[in-house]
Amino acid sequence: MTISENTIVGPISITACNGAVTRLQFLEGSECRSANSADLRILKEAFMQLNLYFSGELREFNIPLMPMGSAFMLKVWRALLRIPYASTASYGDIARLCGNPKAARAVGMANNRNPIPIFIPCHRVIGADGSLVGFGAGLEIKAKLLELESRFALKMRKK
């Protein structure tokens, strides 16, 4: 089942199945859909955690995720979960974490197909030269997410 909400980066829909989040999509426009199901509890929890993340109060998500993809994609997505909040890694870094240092392009394709962005933080992957490259929702949202994490991490260090 899927529910949608408006967020600081625009409308987002989250889908859950069998008690785990399976998809996050950035929606165009401002129209949000809602639905009722047995998965409504996990969807509400996902949005609650997402809103806490957007407000700087949550750095690590704690909801079940169930992305669907090839064995390599799943390996890449697990590696993305290891990138700390407010940090970045290159496609090559992720390829090395996955045990295949020459697979940077394949990592890029797995990132492109990440069905649960933000929860699986593909926005934290950058080019080898430090440039912002590739993000399904656009580089503007990628930059906004990285800036948000950086700003809140800096606030926490100052406390």
Image (cartoon, grey):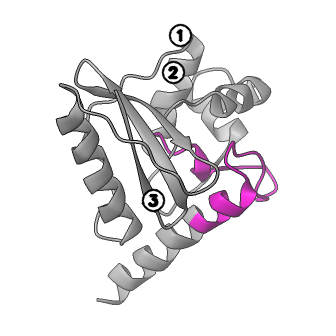
Give above or below for 101 relative to 5. above
Query: 147 or 76: nearer the eye?
Result: 147
Q: Residue 145, image x and y in percent?
A: 55, 63
The residue carrying mark 3 is: 6
The residue carrying mark 2 is: 75
User: Residue shown at 22%/46% (left/top)?
Assistant: 45
Q: Secondary structure at mark 3?
A: strand
Query: 148 or 137: nearer the eye?
Result: 137
Give the mark nearer the N terminus: 1 vs 3.
3
Can residue 97 be seen at all in this image of the molecule? yes
Q: Which residues are magenta?
A: 120-144
The residues tagged by marks 3 and 2 sit, at their Cα atoms, a distance apart of: 31 Å
Could you tell me the amino acid type at mark 2? Lys
Disc number lying in front (3 or 2): 3
Q: Is residue 46 magenta?
A: no
Query: 50 or 92: nearer the eye?
Result: 50
